[in-house]
Amino acid sequence: MEEKRLIRKQIFAARKQCADEQVEEWSRQLTERVIRLPEFLQADRVMAYADYNHEVMTRFIIEEAWKSGREVAVPKVVGKDMVFYRLTDFSQLAPGYFGIPEPTEGETVDWTDALMIMPGVAFDRENHRVGYGGGFYDRFLEKHPDIQRVAVAFDFQILDQVPTEPTDICPQIIVTQSNIYRNALPKGGLINE
Ligand SMILES: Nc1nc2c(c(=O)[nH]1)N(C=O)[C@@H](CNc1ccc(C(=O)N[C@@H](CCC(=O)O)C(=O)O)cc1)CN2
Ligand SMILES: Nc1ncnc2c1ncn2[C@@H]1O[C@H](COP(=O)(O)OP(=O)(O)OP(=O)(O)O)[C@@H](O)[C@H]1O
């Protein structure tokens, strides 16, 4: 869809403009919110992603998860699917699909009950999500309905409205450096924490 293409273009440009230090600072702030969520505290398993190109850095969330004894996995693209591999050290990652850091080898996991930290390009306050357009998360989540979905994004990735499709699976919670959006509340209500 043309509108999604324009949104991706706009957000990629904004992400590119951010200084590395800014991305890191916001990612650290956002991590503090994520690790205080009851959903995170209750999770034994965290399905994260390995960031690239100024996405929200997941390194601090992953380190916190390890520190508190939680298991962590990250995705690798295999054909049209994502396969999650257990991650115990960042040295297990190497540039893969479109240069995204991916696990090179190791143990795959098939968790049905876990907390997922989702990436995304843009979101709106009703928790609709636009990704890179591969449909990887929608296809994976369709098969894993019990996985809790927490998206992470910078404030500039939250738009008034983003286009949706019937196959989209939205995050239940979006965390930015300054807000938490929960779609269980009316109109995806805003909670300041
Ligand atoms: N860090 C990270 N890992 C992830 C995702 C993600 O969003 N972030 N994914 C989430 O699905 C999956 C990979 N999905 C992708 C889907 C399409 C393209 C792609 O076509 N990239 C091109 C064009 C980008 C564009 O301009 O639209 C490129 O990078 O050149 C890349 C990744 C799995 N791993
Ligand atoms: N459950 C599904 N089954 C089959 N096709 C799907 C499914 N979910 C999405 N698709 C298709 O995948 C394509 C990309 O979907 P979409 O634009 O929503 O990707 P995205 O969520 O932005 O990307 P990503 O999840 O990779 O970040 C679309 O053509 C869509 O119809």
Image (tube, helix red, strand yellow):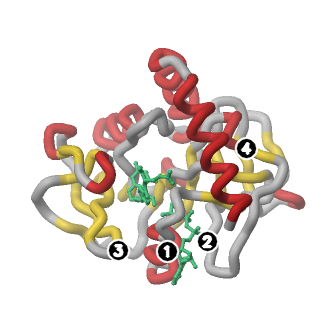
Residue picked out by circle 3 = 81
Q: Secondary structure at mark 4?
A: strand
Ligand 1 sits in which quadrant? bottom left
User: Against 105, is 100 above or below?
Assistant: above
Give amino acid for label 4: Ile
Badge 2 residue CB within 8 Å of ligand 2:
yes
Q: Secondary structure at mark 2?
A: loop
Left of 80 or right of it: where is 136? right
Left of 187 or right of it: where is 97? left
If you read the primary sequence from the N terminus, does the residue marked by circle 1 or circle 4 appear first? 1
Mark number displayed over residue 169:
2
The crowd level at tag 3 (other Cα within 10 Å; few <14, some 14-19, many 20+) is some
Q: CA distance from mark 3 to mark 4?
A: 27 Å
The crowd level at tag 4 (other Cα within 10 Å; few <14, some 14-19, many 20+) is many
Give amino acid for label 2: Ile
- For the C terminus, give its image quadrant: top right
